[in-house]
């Protein structure tokens, strides 16, 4: 983080200093987690869903925090008031502090802020884009999936004065939510991937999701660039919401050019036998050179055809940020999944392959992952297992979406389905109704039961795909499956 003194933090947040603050106090990092403190840190005490950060102020100070941002005065064990900036709402205050920091960084030197939203693929795209930009200059991007009014400021707190590229992931669960985030950090380049059904419950309708995601392009300044997915109708519609002084660039893996000006196109998009995306990266626009139009062959390391969209989005944003297409194309094969549990493939020495996509799940990402599993099975003749937990946050469409997904598993000819958790029962029902029976499909209630079942039945050569909503912690099962000696477990049981 950039160095800030206590007065600057009070100024940025509109807070007041407790009498115990030494005005010369300087902070060099900021976090809401008392376990992440280093000497000179600002500890931000906020009330979370389950715990109140104000209870951890003593721990944070003992771990080195020199200043606290809090909603009320607190005292240490000796009864002395903890040195703090007191604000009404710590979460809002961290947003304000982040905004102040972005201003300082921009004042210091040229900085390009790229914000990414969409119903699926944000983190994958963010990781790909950060990998591209990091080759060109100091780049800051979120850890994991930090994308909220807490995660966005936490990302900005890790930036320095010399940050050249700042990549921000923006998630939303209500109308106006993206605007709140762009008020903290105004993007120069805004990327929209897809509008799907993620968080449909809290939004009420898909139209409301589109309304909200589009806020990201409305925030663009003069000279800003919207990077839009031409293959998603609701995203393409957002071009109308791009401010007059900003411009639009497109990416597509479907439309034959030159349907759009400024189009990054994946020609002949397909996958290798291992389901790595493969395409010819082309660019069409008034500024395109011959090589851009002819295109560059790309074979990526990510797994699944759906990553073509994410790679294209990252390529387009990088192009918008001034990197040449041939540089982008040459870097594409070096991109690997940086954040955990996203189509992470482990080839075990016993010949069993685990594909851990258990970070999260919604209908779109489930279908994408299952299709990849089916294709891998078809390409290689290996037996496929889908180990699926529930998709949460679907509201009233919960049962319907799970039944539909169960049908998809059968239609994709996936050999074995293991449904995990009582919330996912309808997935089992959907598969059975579609014609799966006997030991092709199982329903178990816990990760442990799923593990026991798999340990008994998997054979060398099998491919096991694991996926469910984050809240169901199915990634713990995936971790276990990647590390435990499955064949040995079976021998033991015999
Ligand atoms: N374009 C896509 N279409 C369908 N599924 C996708 C796509 N991109 C990624 N996925 C899958 O969706 C899941 C989430 O991916 P990722 O973490 O990149 O998305 P996200 O938008 O950041 O999600 P979140 O809102 O949970 O932060 C993963 O299972 C991933 O494989
Ligand atoms: Mg994410």
Image (tube, rainbow, N blue to C red):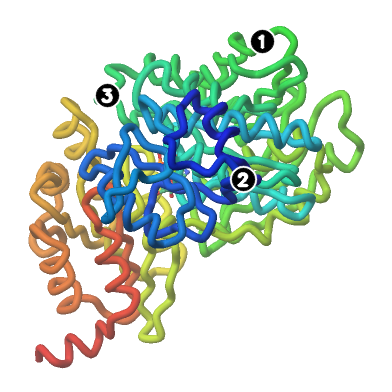
Estimate the x, y position of residue 470 in percent, counting from the top left.
29, 49
Q: Is residue 438 above or below residue 427?
A: below
- Can residue 116 be seen in this snapshot? no
In the rendered structure, the answer to whether residue 279 lies left or right of residue 53 reads right
Which mark sits nearer the N-terminus, 2 or 1?
A: 1
Res. 124 mark: none
Q: Earlier in the sequence, mark 1 or mark 3?
A: 3
Q: Nearer the viewer, residue 259 or 60?
A: 60
Give x and y (percent) for residue 365: 38, 43
Q: What residue sits right under mark 2 in the picture? A: 311
Residue under label 3: 202
**Callout 1 environment at 10 Å: few (<14), some (14 to 19), or many (20+)?**
some
Q: Which quarter of the rendering shows the C terminus?
A: bottom left
Residue 460 appears at what percent x and percent y? 32, 81
Vertical arrangement, residue 297 with respect to residue 250, above or below: below
Distance of label 2 from label 1 (alpha carbons): 26 Å
Between the residue at mark 1 and the residue at mark 3, the CA separation in whole angstroms equals: 28 Å
Query: Where does ligand 1 appear, by image quarter?
Result: top left
The quarter of the picture where residue 204 lies is top left
Question: Of marks 2 and 3, which one's residue comes earlier in the chain?
Answer: 3
Q: Residue at x 37, y 38 (%)?
A: 364
Task: Answer yes or no: disc 1 within 8 Å of ligand 1.
Answer: no
Q: Secondary structure at mark 3?
A: helix
Instruction: Say the numbered circle drawn on residue 243.
Output: 1
Query: Crowdedness of circle 2 by 10 Å Cα count: few (<14), some, many (20+)?
Result: many
Q: Position of residue 352 (x, y in %)?
A: 35, 77
Q: Nearer the viewer, mark 2 or mark 3?
A: 3
**Is 430 left or right of 352, judged from the image as shown?**
left
Q: The residue tagged with tag 1: helix, strand or loop?
A: loop
């Amino acid at each position: 983080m950039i160095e800030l003194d206590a007065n600057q933090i009070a100024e940025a947040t509109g807070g007041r200093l407790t009498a115990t603050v030494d005005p010369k106090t300087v902070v060099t990092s900021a976090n809401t987690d008392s376990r992440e403190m280093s000497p000179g840190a600002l500890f931000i005490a906020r009330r979370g869903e389950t715990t109140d950060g104000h209870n951890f102020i003593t721990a944070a100070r003992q771990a080195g925090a020199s200043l606290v941002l809090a909603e009320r005065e607190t005292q240490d064990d000796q009864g002395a008031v903890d040195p703090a900036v007191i604000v009404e709402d710590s979460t809002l205050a961290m947003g304000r502090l982040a905004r102040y920091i972005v201003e300082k960084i921009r004042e210091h030197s040229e900085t390009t802020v790229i914000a990414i939203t969409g119903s699926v693929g944000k983190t994958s795209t963010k990781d790909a884009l950060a990998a591209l930009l990091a080759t060109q200059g100091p780049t800051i991007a979120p850890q994991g999936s930090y994308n909220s009014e807490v995660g966005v400021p936490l990302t900005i707190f890790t930036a320095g004065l010399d940050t050249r590229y700042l990549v921000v992931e923006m998630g939303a669960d209500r109308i106006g939510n993206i605007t709140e985030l762009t008020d903290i950090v105004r993007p120069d380049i805004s990327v929209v991937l897809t509008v799907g059904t993620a968080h449909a419950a809290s939004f009420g309708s898909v139209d409301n999701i589109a309304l909200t995601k589009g806020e990201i392009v409305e925030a663009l300044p003069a000279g800003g660039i919207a990077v839009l997915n031409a293959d998603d109708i609701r995203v393409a519609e957002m071009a109308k919401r791009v401010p007059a002084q900003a411009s639009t660039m497109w990416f597509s893996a479907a439309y034959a050019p030159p349907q759009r000006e400024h189009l990054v196109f994946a020609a002949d998009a397909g996958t290798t036998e291992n389901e790595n995306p493969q395409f010819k990266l082309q660019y069409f626009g008034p500024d395109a050179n011959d090589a851009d139009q002819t295109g560059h062959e790309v074979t990526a390391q990510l797994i699944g055809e759906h990553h073509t969209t994410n790679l294209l989005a990252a390529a387009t944003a990088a192009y918008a940020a001034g990197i040449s297409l041939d540089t982008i194309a040459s870097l594409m094969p070096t991109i690997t999944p940086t954040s955990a549990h996203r189509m992470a493939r482990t080839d075990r020495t016993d010949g069993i392959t685990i594909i851990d996509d258990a970070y999260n799940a919604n209908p779109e990402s489930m279908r994408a992952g299952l299709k990849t599993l089916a294709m891998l099975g078809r390409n290689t003749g290996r037996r496929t297992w889908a180990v699926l937990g529930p998709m949460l946050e679907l509201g009233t469409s919960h049962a319907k979406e799970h039944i539909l997904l169960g049908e998809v598993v059968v239609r994709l000819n996936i050999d074995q389905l293991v449904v995990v958790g009582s919330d996912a029962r309808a997935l089992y029902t959907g598969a059975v109704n579609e014609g799966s029976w006997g030991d092709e499909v199982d329903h178990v209630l816990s990760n442990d039961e799923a593990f026991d079942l798999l340990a008994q039945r998997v054979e060398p050569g099998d491919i096991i795909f694991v996926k469910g909503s984050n809240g169901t912690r199915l990634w713990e099962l995936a971790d276990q499956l990647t590390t435990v000696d499955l064949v040995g477990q079976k021998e033991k049981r015999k």
